[in-house]
Image (spheres, helix red, strand yellow):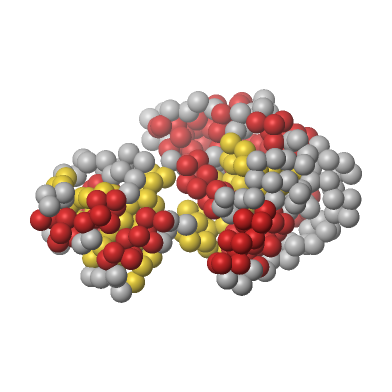
């Protein structure tokens, strides 16, 4: 299953332009608010040099990278949590996301109207954060009376933890603080996970800067201000990224990057940042001449990873043969790796590491 990331932000901040750059799609991107009505959804392969090298060495019949699904919804405005600008529907479209990309306008193009009439990144961030918090508060406060009645009727109800967690979150959100900053225990977090709280999701702020800004500089110095929020901030010129992906060949794209003085595409940095933000790693399988990359939370046991590949593998797990991708690339084949004694046998409690190549032995 692909990692899912929702793009949020005010109207006219460059979300759809960034979405098009990410997905090489054709979502409408215009200089007026609400040009996006229905959500745009695109699935993007994660750039993976190790997978490319493994493919070159192993020559599989098929090669499948990991992927990220991006969902771009219309710009949110004050009152979105109450339905302004169809905000409730737009918020619902990203409730199933694993993380949010909050695109913040940091460019001063006078031909692109700002919904609030002036450029103020911190104010804009506050508007969106407030709407996410208010939307979550509405969800929780709708549910609390039902749980209260249930717990009063049955004091030993298995949903007591859920009720108490929602009470804690309600007070926290009412104080104007996002749920992600509430120090919940693992049990509490699990009990509230089904609500898809928007302000509980990890968030990466994307500072969309002027085209003139290079990879390290910024035409309008808002990213420094955004850093004060205590969250990850990635600086990207969405218009440049859209120009890069519009070029016909990889060579043309490489030449464009060199001309702009850029080491790599900003969207590649963005995808890696989304991985890092969620604590994900990549492992690989090679079986039946099929090479595949898989996403996995860091510190996951190999038996759980086997279940991610196929439920039968998880249930009937016996052991796993494991090698690092670099070792396999160096050896040139799985057979050569075995003969060199560089293949490890691991039990079900082994924690999969980033770059592991795994063959699972299991019984049906």
Q: Is residue 143 visible?
A: no
Give the quarter of the image for residue 169. Answer: top right
Q: Nearer the viewer, residue 217 or 36?
A: 217
Q: Position of residue 305 (x, y in %)?
A: 29, 50
**Would residue 227 be found to the left or right of residue 159 on screen?**
right
Q: Position of residue 266 (x, y in %)?
A: 60, 51
- Where, quadrant-wise, is the N terminus in this rendering? bottom left
Q: Nearer the viewer, residue 310 or 42?
A: 42
Q: Nearer the viewer, residue 269 or 84?
A: 269
Q: Is residue 177 above or below residue 209?
A: above
| Image label count | 0
Residue at position x 89%, y 50% from top? 110
Q: Position of residue 215 (x, y in %)?
A: 65, 45
Q: Is residue 264 above or below residue 61?
A: above
Residue at position x 83%, y 59% from top? 31
Residue at position x 61%, y 28% from top? 230
Q: Position of residue 74 (x, y in %)?
A: 72, 56
Residue at position x 21%, y 56% from top? 331
Give the quarter of the image for residue 238. Answer: bottom right
**Would residue 281 be found to the left or right of residue 200 on screen?**
left
Q: Is residue 175 visible?
A: yes
- Where, quadrant-wise, is the C terminus in this rendering? bottom left
Give the quarter of the image for residue 137. Answer: top right
């Amino acid at each position: 299953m692909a990692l899912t990331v929702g793009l949020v932000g005010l109207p006219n901040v460059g979300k759809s332009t960034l979405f098009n750059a990410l997905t090489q799609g054709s979502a409408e991107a215009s200089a007026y608010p609400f040009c996006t009505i229905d959500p745009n959804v695109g699935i993007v392969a994660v750039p993976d040099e190790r997978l490319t090298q493994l493919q070159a060495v192993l020559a599989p019949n098929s090669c499948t990278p990991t992927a990220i699904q991006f969902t771009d919804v219309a710009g949110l405005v004050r009152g979105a949590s109450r339905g302004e600008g169809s905000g409730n529907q737009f918020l619902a479209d990203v409730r199933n996301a694993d993380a949010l990309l909050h695109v913040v306008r940091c460019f001063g193009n006078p031909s692109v109207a700002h919904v609030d009439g002036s450029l103020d990144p911190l104010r804009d961030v506050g508007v969106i954060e407030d709407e996410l918090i208010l939307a979550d508060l509405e969800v929780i406060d709708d549910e609390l009376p039902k749980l209260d009645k249930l717990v009063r009727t049955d004091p030993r109800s298995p949903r007591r933890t859920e009720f108490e967690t929602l009470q804690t979150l309600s007070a926290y959100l009412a104080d104007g603080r996002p749920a992600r900053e509430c120090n919940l225990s693992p049990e509490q977090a699990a009990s509230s996970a089904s609500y898809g709280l928007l302000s509980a999701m990890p968030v990466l702020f994307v500072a969309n800067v002027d085209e003139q800004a290079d990879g390290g500089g910024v035409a309008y110095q808002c990213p420094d201000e955004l850093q004060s929020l205590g969250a990850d901030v990635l600086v990207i010129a969405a218009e440049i990224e859209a120009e890069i992906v519009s070029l016909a060949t990889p060579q043309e794209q490489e030449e464009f990057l060199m001309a702009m003085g850029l080491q790599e595409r900003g969207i590649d940095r963005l995808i890696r940042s989304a991985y890092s933000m969620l604590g994900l790693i990549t492992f690989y399988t090679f079986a039946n001449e099929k090479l595949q990359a898989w996403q996995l939370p860091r510190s996951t046991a190999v038996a759980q990873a086997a279940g991610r590949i196929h439920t039968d593998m998880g249930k009937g797990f016996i052991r796993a043969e494991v090698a690092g991708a670099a070792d396999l690339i160096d050896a040139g084949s799985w057979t050569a790796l075995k003969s060199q004694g560089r293949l490890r046998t691991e039990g079900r409690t082994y924690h999969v590491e980033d770059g592991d190549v795994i063959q699972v032995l299991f019984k049906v």
